[in-house]
Amino acid sequence: MDRISALRNVEDALRAFEEGDVDLTEAERRVAATLRTYASELDGEDDVFRAVGDPAVDGRVVVAASAPAARERVLAAAGIDPDRIDDEGDVPEFDVERV
């Protein structure tokens, strides 16, 4: 799915919500499905990764060039700065897997 198709699908979901054809839950489901499809079909040098593990990050999906870069992006998306983590183990335990 290219970017234009993804935007059209999101627009269709918003229009259906505005017109009362779907409720918010269904509109959210449609938008999320569009984004997942778009992310899983990205072309380019980067890959799509999903975090699996600690609930603070589990299920987060990011685009990155490598697994280590994906870990950093997952932490950033969760609001965790890996450079500011103290020795008390504030880093969630998780792995990243290609989607």
Image (spheres, grey):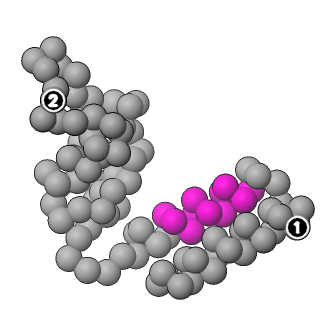
Range shown magenta: 26-36
Q: Residue furthest top?
A: 88
Percent position (x, y) of residue 29? Answer: 66, 57
Look at the image and tell me in which quarter the C terminus lies.
Answer: bottom left
Q: Which residue lies furthest to the right in this view?
A: 20
Is 76 displayed left or right of 24 in the figure? left
Residue type at mark 1: give it: Glu
Residue at 41%, 68% in the rendered image: 39
Residue at 62%, 63% in the rendered image: 31
The disc, 2 or 1, on the residue closer to the chain's N-terminal end is 1
Estimate how packed mark 2 is, as few (under 14), some (14 to 19) or many (20 or more) residues with alpha carbons within 10 Å.
few
Residue type at mark 2: give it: Arg
How would you classify the magenta stretch by its main secondary structure? helix
Q: Distance between the residues labelled 2 and 1?
A: 47 Å
Residue 85 lies in quadrant:
top left
Say which residue label 2 marks.
84
Q: Magenta stretch containing residue 66, yes or no? A: no
- For label 1, the SS is loop
Percent position (x, y) of residue 42? Answer: 36, 76
Residue at 14%, 51% in the rendered image: 68
Q: Can residue 94 be seen in this view?
A: no
Instruction: Please name which of the two marks, 2 or 1, marks the residue nearer to the observer.
Output: 2
Residue 96, placed above or below residue 89: below
Which mark, by number, is residue 19?
Answer: 1
Residue at 27%, 41% in the rendered image: 75
Percent position (x, y) of residue 79? Answer: 33, 37
Front position in the image: 83 or 34 = 83
Q: Is residue 82 visible?
A: yes
